[in-house]
Image: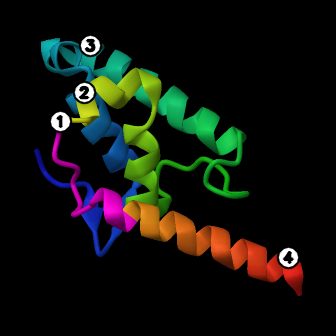
Amino acid sequence: MKSPVKNGKTRIDRAINFIAETVYPEEFNRDKKGKRAARKRVTSMISRAYTDDVFGKAVFDRMRWEDAAAFYTWASNKKEWKHALKDMPLPINLSVDNVVHAQKAESSTIRHAASL
């Protein structure tokens, strides 16, 4: 499986394939119809995340590039995908410490901006 990450970014269409193949391997590898169904399930979840502004005010676009750390952290915390992605090495070098540090930094930046 080729990594969908390049220079710390992931393109959504590549992420869809990666997650579909990882989370729904039997369906994905069965035939063209199964592959399409697995991708459709993943696409639906990602599209919903954009609708809910999980990735900011961005609009869902398969060719869009997202920050890989943020995207795969979100994906690995999805209830429906957690079981498959928890033991899977993510296509980037993420550690829990890096994610927690990034979340604290973001939270600190938001608090600082609010105090101005």
**Crowd band around label 2 with a 10 angstrom C-alpha radius: few (<14), some (14–19), many (20+):** some
- Return the residue at label 2: 84
Return the residue at label 1: 87
User: Could you say which is closer to the camera, residue 18 or residue 86?
Assistant: 86
Indicate the quadrant containing the N terminus: top left, top right, bottom left or bottom right.
top left
The overriding secondary structure of the stretch rendered in magenta is: loop
The residue at which mark 4 appears reads as 114
Q: Which residue is mark 3?
A: 34
Instruction: Name the front one of labels 4 and 1.
Output: 4
Asked where in the image residue 48 lies, by quadrant, the reply is top right
Image point (23%, 61%), residue name: 92
**Magenta segment:** 87-98
Q: Is residue 30 above or below residue 22?
A: above
Residue 116 lies in quadrant: bottom right
Residue 35, position in %: x, y?
A: 26, 21
Q: Amino acid at mark 2?
A: Ala
Residues under labels 3 and 1: Cα distance? Answer: 23 Å
Q: Residues within 10 Å of mark 4 (few under 14, many from 20)?
A: few
13 on left or right of 47: left
Tell which circle, 3 or 2, labels the residue nearer the N-terminal end: 3
Helix, strand or loop status at disc 4: helix
- Tag 2 and tag 1, C-beta contact below 8 Å: yes
Q: Residue at x 48, y 69 (%)?
A: 102
Name the image quarter holding residue 75.
Answer: top left
Confirm or deny contact between disc 3 and disc 2 (CB under 8 A): no
Q: How far is the residue under mark 2 from the one under mark 1? A: 7 Å
Please report whichever mark, 3 or 4, sits nearer to the chain's N-terminal start: 3
Q: Secondary structure at mark 3?
A: helix
Kind of residue at disc 1? Asp
Crowding at dot 3, Cα within 10 Å, few <14 / some 14-19 / many 20+, comes out as: some
